[in-house]
Image: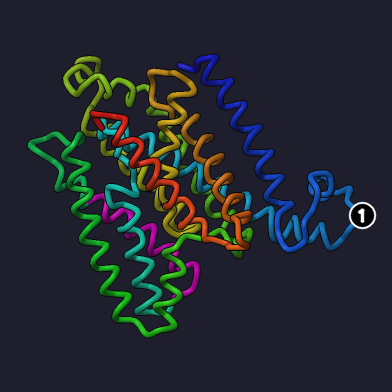
Amino acid sequence: MWRPRAALVCGLLALAGAALGILLMGTGTLPLTPGEVLSSLLGTGENPTADRIVLRIRLPRVATAMLVGAALGMAGSIFQSISRNALGSPDIIGFTTGAATGAIVQIILFNAGPFETALAAALSGMGTAGVVFLLSMQGRSTGGYRLVLVGIGVGAIMSGVNTVLLVMGDLDRASAAQIWLSGSLNTRTWFHVVPAAVGLAVVMPVAILHARRIDLLEMGDDAASQLGVNVERTRLVMVMTAVGLTALATAATGPIAFIALAGPQLARRLTRSPGVPLVSGACMGAVLLLAADLLSQRFPFNVSLPIGLTTGLLGGFYLLLLLTRSPKV
């Protein structure tokens, strides 16, 4: 059910995202005013250099950030709902680490290009999710704290595998893998935007169509089953949907922390809606990633941080705040 407050919050988040995008497209070696950015976007600019920079370099970066943030925000909403735990985030329960393993294998062992690396990350993330889902199954039921704990364990194993792979590789390939692991929006082109946009157009409707069933699952498996929900089938479909969203995001930018954890929680607080914040979580995720990118580019002391390190730093503080203020997570 669509609620007026949720619709208002999503509208305001969309406006905030647009404003951050304009600021980002004006940020760089060649600073541009918001008016110059808008002129370039509308095709009325009189500066060909500015037009090329905005349309060919900065707009794809902003579009990638929006798509990746939206994917992570919606994925986090699904994981937190299924696990019934505020820590139910793909970067905490191991799915992002598993996706990174496939990418590192391609970079270290095969010196693969961007397309092969992205494909391997997507497939590896889905494979990791399948393992976590099977190991967390107790009887015929999954979810809850068991899903989170199993995910943390599998993530720790995959993190160890990633470290071993980095040690095995030569210096150049290990450096390339380490750069990928830091998560970055640099050098994003339309080559990165188009696959992410197509993937989201395919995967996100699946989540939205199952929104009502996810809401019923939060009432408990027994209650949802009595209301006609096929609990395990719905949970499996939604886990794979969330994994697909996470894999798309990781393939486009590398591992990005914090967004999937904080986006849904902040969206739920703003909307005050009892339902799972799928759309509002996606909007909040996009805004958070754009804000983090703006912060990373305007960091003091002329330090330019990769976006993955910026979100990881912010996420660490947010996680500590969440653990100290919430007795039950």
Q: Position of residue 238 (x, y in %)?
A: 33, 37
Q: Is residue 204 magenta?
A: no
Amino acid type for the residue under numbered disc 1? Glu
Q: Is residue 207 above or below residue 303?
A: above
Give the residue at mark 1.
46
Q: Residue at x 33, y 41 (%)?
A: 320
Q: Is residue 126 left or right of residue 32?
A: left
Q: Position of residue 236 (x, y in %)?
A: 26, 39
Q: Is residue 58 above or below residue 81?
A: below
Q: Position of residue 188 (x, y in %)?
A: 60, 61
Q: Residue at x 51, y 48 (%)?
A: 68
Q: Is residue 58 left or right of residue 328?
A: right
Where is residue 254, by image quadrant? bottom left
Q: The magenta stretch spans which residues?
A: 112-130
Q: Is residue 250 above or below residue 167?
A: above
Which residue is farthest right? 46
